[in-house]
Image (cartoon, rainbow, N blue to C red):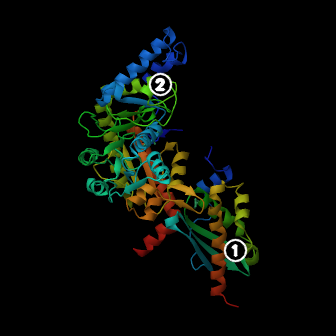
Amino acid sequence: MRQVYLDHNATTPVHPEVKKAVAPFLAEQFGNPSSIHWAGREVRREVEDARQEIAAFFGCQPLEVVFTSSGTESDNLAIKGVAYRKGNAGKHIVTTAVEHPAIMNTGKFLEAQGFRVTYVPVNRQGIVEADTVRKAITKDTVLVSVMHANNETGCIMPVAEIGRIAREAGVLMHTDAVQATGKIPIDWKTLPVDMLTFSGHKVNGLKGAGGLIVRKGIELESVIHGGHQERGRRGGTENVVGIVAMGKAFSLLRQGMPEEVRETRRLRDKFEKALFDRIPEIVLNGHPTDRLPNTVNLSFRFVEGEALLLNLDMMGIACSSGSACTSGSVEASPILLAMGADPVDAQGALRFSLGRGNTDADIDYVVDAIEAVVDKLRAMSPLFHREAKAR
Amino acid sequence: MAGGPYTAKVMDHFMNPRNVGEIENADGVGEVGNPACGDMMRLYLKVEEGKIVDAKFRTFGCGAAIASSSMLTEMIKGKTLEEARAITNQQVAEALDGLPPVKIHCSVMAEQAVKAALDDYVKKNPG
Ligand SMILES: Cc1ncc(COP(=O)(O)O)c(C=O)c1O
Ligand code: FES
């Protein structure tokens, strides 16, 4: 059966060049980068080369890159690192209602520790308005954290504008750029933020490796206490394989990103247009233009997301639904509800995220499949028939 | 083919649901669930001489909800009203070779739908 992967915001396939680059580190290059002998020295050099590549991609200095185990750990380090270091200056953090659980639940944890966290809302199109952040900042605020782009909707937030507001207020600014990385240009030199999270497996690298860029001069409390690795900012022998993979992935992106993004955007736009042309009663969740070039989140009205997802899976199509079943009810995606989406429509939302390797033939296949599955489920839906009768 | 968390029986009833549709001039209709919570089921019954002779449904919901609806209609056909009223969600789940724990409530909807449809029948046919 044909398999089409349209879930690149969840994770991406490993780039063949990345696979090649890491092979020696699963064999002869086994040394500990902290060892001063021959076995360690070469591995150290590779780790630092990877750091260089990543720094070159973002336009930061290599020593501003802190390697971690994931985007999740980077988010933890940014938030807790500032909170614990700056806690005495003030105990208030401003973030948004649509962050990834890595930020959301870190915020909840800090609330239990006596911090105050404001989760600013988004507008109907899923965008955080800079002014709402401005109004949320108080004299107690030590950190603003706003994601660069949202994982479910692809909405791109005005991070530069919010960063300037934070600067004026003398507050540190973090952005979770896990989804934005590799999809829209990011320039550390001109972006007024102090910390930025990225993750390897969203850019055709490996799972279990990520990083936090920390502007020179900013001190964070560690989250993982241990050895002197990462200049004392993150203990633990480095995940060499994951780091080398990221180095390769970012060097590939530095060369190929404009072309790749153009192609992904073309396919995404074609996909989106075909669906709107062929299937009635679809709702776009997210901003029509301020959106990642690979992402489209749609509600297929009168049908439920998991049923859609399972049917598509049976046809070899991988995508995602934001709703999560909890005992008693299927909870619609909190992200869509935070945007003020109709709660019933939110139940029928699917996220499609394209990436490297998707083709025109994939898109044609998936559009046909979605049309057939939506027809089938609507024929079964009491909501669809009620609506049809009302008309 | 693997159906993620679901048994082969659930996947069968989900992918090829039995008795989808509507019965014109049904003797009993039951509607339960709340679409904002992700599920809603409408069940139609045709009753003759104290027995359910036909059942059809329409369901908005997840895979487990659709499979439970389909299985339920199979189970109640030919049953007396008392027998149908006695059907529990556990019996529906068992007939599907089980449901994941978080999906048990989807079969509850099926149980409630029969009871609602039978109540409607009684209301339309007092005495
Ligand atoms: C916006 C965002 N932040 C953080 C993460 C977590 O990254 P990781 O999977 O590397 O922990 C993700 C991954 O889904 C994400 O989309
Ligand atoms: S209908 Fe509730 S999760 Fe199945």
Numbered mark located on residue B53 in the image: 1
Looking at the rendered image, the disc whose residue lies closer to the viewer, 2 or 1, is: 2
Residue A292 spot, x, y in % from top left: 33, 44
Residue at point 35%, 25% (across, down): A63
Given the image, what chain letter belongs to the residue carrying mark 2? Answer: A
Residue at point 52%, 63% (across, down): B38
What type is the residue that disc 1 sits on?
Val
Q: How crowded is mark 1: few (under 14 residues within 10 Å), some or many (20 or more)?
A: some
> In the rendered image, which quarter is residue A366 located in?
top left
Residue at point 65%, 81% (across, down): B119
Quadrant of image for the C terminus of chain A: bottom left
Q: How crowded is mark 2: few (under 14 residues within 10 Å), some or many (20 or more)?
A: few
For the residues marked 2 and 1, what is the alpha-carbon distance in whole angstroms? 76 Å
Residue A103 spot, x, y in % from top left: 44, 47
Q: Report if residue A284 is visible in the image.
A: no
Left or right relative to A240: residue B80? right
What type is the residue that disc 2 sits on?
His
